[in-house]
Image (cartoon, rainbow, N blue to C red):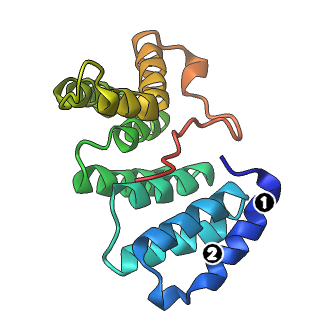
Amino acid sequence: MLVRVGLASVLALVAGCAAPATQTRDAQFTRAILAQDVGDETGAFADYLRIVQAGEANSAVFNNLAVITARQRKLSEARNWLEYAVATDPDDVIARANLGVVEFHLGQRDKAHEALAEARMRRQEIIRHMPSMGRVNWYALRYAEFTEHADQVARDYLDKLAHPSPAAAALPPGSIEVAWLISE
C-alpha cells in the first residue's frame, strides 16, 4: 500500500508519463485511483469519464464513478452507474453490493434485498467454482479476501432489511458505506 505522503508524487509522475490521449485504460484507471485516494474526486471522476467516453470502461470504472457520485449524495445517478457496472459484468459482486446499498438508501427495499442477496450468492458460487491448483485453492482464497468487505456490507444491509428501524434508512452526512473497488 502506498503511503499518503508519496501519493501526490506518484500521481504527478503518472500524470506526466503520457498525455491523456495516449494513455491506456489501465494507466488512466491507475491515475484515477490515485487521484481518488489523495482526495481529488473531481480529477478521478474526469479520468474515469474519459475511459467511458473512449468506450473502454469495465465494471470497475462504472463502480468507481458510482462511489464518487454516491459520496456527493447523487444516489439516483450512482444507481445508474452501478446498473452499468452490473450490466457490464454480472459477476462483479462489489458493484452489485454497492447497488444494493444505494437502493436501500433510495428506499427501494425489494431492489436492495435482491441486489445484496445476489451479490452474496454470486460471490459464493464464484469461489466454489474456481479451479484448484493443488491442495489449497489460492485463487479462491485471494478472491474471497478481495471481496470480503463487499460481502460484509451485503450481510450488514440484509440484516438492516430484516430488522428495519426508522434510523436505519437515515443517511447522515458522510456515512454511506460504498465498498470502493480499487483494482479490476
140, above or below 80, in the image: above
Q: How far apart are marks 1 and 2 (CA)?
A: 12 Å
Mark 1 Cα-neighbour bin, 10 Å: few <14, some 14–19, many ≥20: few
Query: Mark 2 highlights which residue?
Result: 14
Mark 2 Cα-neighbour bin, 10 Å: few <14, some 14–19, many ≥20: some
Q: Nearer the viewer, residue 33 or 136?
A: 136
18, above or below 156, in the image: below
Q: Nearer the viewer, residue 42 or 13?
A: 13
Q: Could you say where residue 171 lies in the image, as x and y percent from the top left?
A: 62, 34
Residue type, label 1 = Gly
Q: Could you say where residue 168 lies in the image, as x and y percent from the top left?
A: 56, 21
Numbered label attached to residue 133: none
1, above or below 81, in the image: above
- The number of numbered discs placed on residues in the rendered structure image is 2
Residue type, label 2 = Val
Residue drawn at (56%, 86%) of the image? 18
Query: Mark 1 highlights which residue?
Result: 6
